[in-house]
Amino acid sequence: MYDTDLADRVRAYLIGAPGLTIEEKKMFGGMAFLVNGKMCINVSGDKLMCRFDPADLSEVEKRKGYQSMVMKGKTLPGYCLVNLEGYGQPDDFSYWIELCLAFNKEVRASKDRK
């Protein structure tokens, strides 16, 4: 289950950015937004799950609302969760989405596993 209002905010932001191909897909128990064929940002419950350049971790982990992303007992580099405290204000919300979009430009799309 995921916060549909938060997903609407993410969708509206992405739609407003020029030159993006956006696809929505249910992933990680939430709604993932794929940008130009690559997983960019996800709404998981009432949190944003952000994909960012792992080299930016020292800056990113200082942001309010930041939580490292742990799956199966392992911290995933380049992924984090952000709670409402971290994205509630418009400037903070923009920060996280722009962080994800910047990294999205750098990564390659994963090969289709089908």
Image: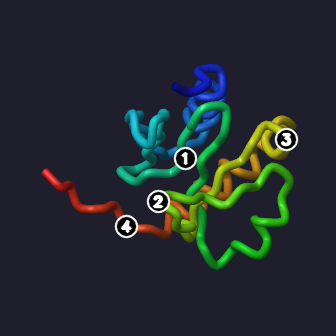
The image's colour scheme reads rainbow
- For marks 4 and 3, give the CA distance: 31 Å
Q: Earlier in the sequence, mark 2 or mark 4?
A: 2
Question: Given contact means CB atoms under 8 Å apart, are the residues at marks 3 and 1 in contact?
Answer: no
Q: Which mark is residue 41?
A: 1
- Find residue 106 and report its horizontal and vertical position in percent: 49, 69
Q: Residues within 10 Å of mark 2 (few under 14, many from 20)?
A: few
x and y percentages locating residue 59 in the rendered image: 79, 71
Quadrant assignment, res 17? top right
Q: Which mark is residue 3?
A: none
Mark toward the start of the polypeptide (2 vs 1)? 1
Q: Which of marks 4 and 3 is in front?
A: 3
Decide: few, some or many residues near mark 3? Use Cα within 10 Å; few <14, some 14-19, many ≥20.
Answer: few
Q: How far apart are marks 2 and 4 (CA)?
A: 25 Å
The image shows residue 14, relative to residue 19, as above or below, that is: above
Of badges 2 and 4, the one in the foreground is 2
Q: Residue 72 carries which label?
A: 2
Provide the secondary structure element on which disc 3 rests: helix
Q: Name the residue under label 4.
A: 108
Single out the mark in the foreground, 3 or 1. 3
According to the image, label 3 marks what residue? 85
Q: Distance between the residues labelled 2 and 3?
A: 25 Å
Q: Which of marks 2 and 3 is in front?
A: 2
| Label 1 element class | strand
